Image (tube, rainbow, N blue to C red):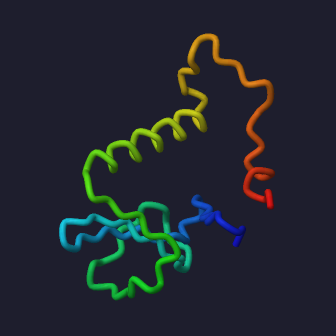
Amino acid sequence: MIKGKAKMEFGTGDIRMTGALSNNIGALCCITQPPHEIGEKVPVEDEWDPVQAEVILTFSRTESIDALIAELQDVKAMMNETYPLEKGRIREQNLDFDTFMHRP
């Protein structure tokens, strides 16, 4: 793991995302699993331990979930090349995500 940065790569079906609620705090737990079909629902009876989660996103307000969903929709639009770039906004060079993730 890169110091100060956690990275999970989605796209192969090996990350289980499980929602939870405790004391009015919502959580999304991400757990590495053997690959499955992306989006496949695992039965609730399937046991797992929160200690297994490599990443846990917690939410105390639903507006934070809406903000995360909006950003994910933007990323999806970028990947689909349908993201409406703002007029006049020019980036001198593309963001090199690999370099960003490996900076000391």
Q: Is residue 46 left or right of residue 21?
A: right
Q: In which quarter of the image is the C terminus?
A: bottom right
* Residue nearest the viewer, comparing 35 with 88: 88
**Among all residues in the image, which is located at the extreme top?**
88
- Determine the residue positioned at 47% across, 84% down: 52
**Residue 70 in which image quadrant:** top left
Q: Position of residue 23 (x, y in %)?
A: 19, 72
- Determine the residue positioned at 28% across, 45% down: 63
**Residue 42 in which image quadrant:** bottom left
Q: Position of residue 43 (x, y in %)?
A: 30, 78
Q: Where is residue 10 in the image (x, y as percent from the top left)?
A: 58, 60
Q: Quadrant of the N terminus?
A: bottom right
* Residue nearest the viewer, comparing 13 with 17: 17
Q: In this view, does 86 lie above or below 9?
A: above
Q: In this view, does 46 lie above or below 95?
A: below
Q: Is residue 20 left or right of residue 97?
A: left
Q: Where is residue 91 in the image (x, y as percent from the top left)?
A: 73, 25
* Residue nearest the viewer, comparing 59 with 76: 59
- Determine the residue positioned at 60% across, 29% down: 81
